[in-house]
Amino acid sequence: MSETRIQDPHRHTLPEDTQGLLTGTLLVALSVSLLHGAGLFTGQIAGLSLVLSYVTGWSFGAIFFTLNLPFYWLAFRRMGARFTVKTVLSVALLSGFTEIFPHLLSFAILHPGAA
């Protein structure tokens, strides 16, 4: 009879983390692209990054990554190295995807309600 191992329910495997990080950042990047295409913004750091990208002409990804820099130190102190690495990776993926998406997506007409 084989023994079944029960995993810690608070830990994810590497494939689960990879799938979650990729899926989550791709969906958020799509959302940011929709907001940007409609000239809208949201709250928090993502919203501030969108507003600054409109005002300065700099890319959302570069601004978003830069504005998150102070939070990595806070994450490390409060949540630990594992959480911080995942956070840096998530922000980097989101920043990168938002740089790539304009080359893959364009919106001739995008109603703000749809965005």
Image (tube, rainbow, N blue to C red):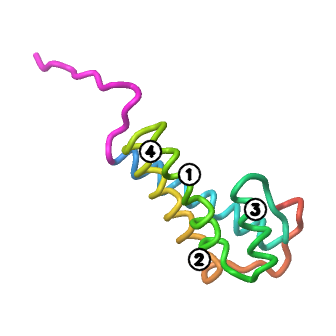
Q: Residue at x 53, y 71 (%)?
A: 96
Neighbourhood count class around disc 2 (C-alpha, 10 Å): few under 14, some 14–19, many 20 upward: some
Amino acid type assigned to the residue bearing label 2 in the image: Glu
Taking depth in this image into account, of 91 and 37 the one nearest to the observer is 91
Amino acid type assigned to the residue bearing label 1 in the image: Phe
Taking depth in this image into account, of 14 and 60 the one nearest to the observer is 60
Circle 2 is placed at which residue position? 99
Q: Residue at x 21, y 20 (%)?
A: 4
Residue 31 position by quadrant: bottom right
- Which numbered tag is attached to residue 76? 4
**Is residue 10 shown in magenta?**
yes
SS at mark 3 in the image: helix
Q: CA distance from mark 2 to mark 1?
A: 22 Å
Magenta residues (range): 1-14
Which of label 3 and label 1 is nearer to you? 1
Q: Earlier in the sequence, mark 1 or mark 4?
A: 1
Identify the image quadrant of the N terminus: top left
Q: CA distance from mark 4 to mark 2?
A: 27 Å
Going by the image, does 96 lie left or right of 102?
left
SS at mark 4 in the image: helix
- Which numbered tag is attached to residue 48? 3
The spot of residue 104 in percent (x, y) is 61, 80
Circle 1 is placed at which residue position? 71
- Which numbered tag is attached to residue 32? none
Which of label 2 and label 3 is nearer to you? 3
Q: CA distance from mark 3 to mark 1?
A: 15 Å
Q: Earlier in the sequence, mark 4 or mark 2?
A: 4
Taking depth in this image into account, of 87 and 114 the one nearest to the observer is 87
SS at mark 2 in the image: helix
Q: Earlier in the sequence, mark 3 or mark 1?
A: 3
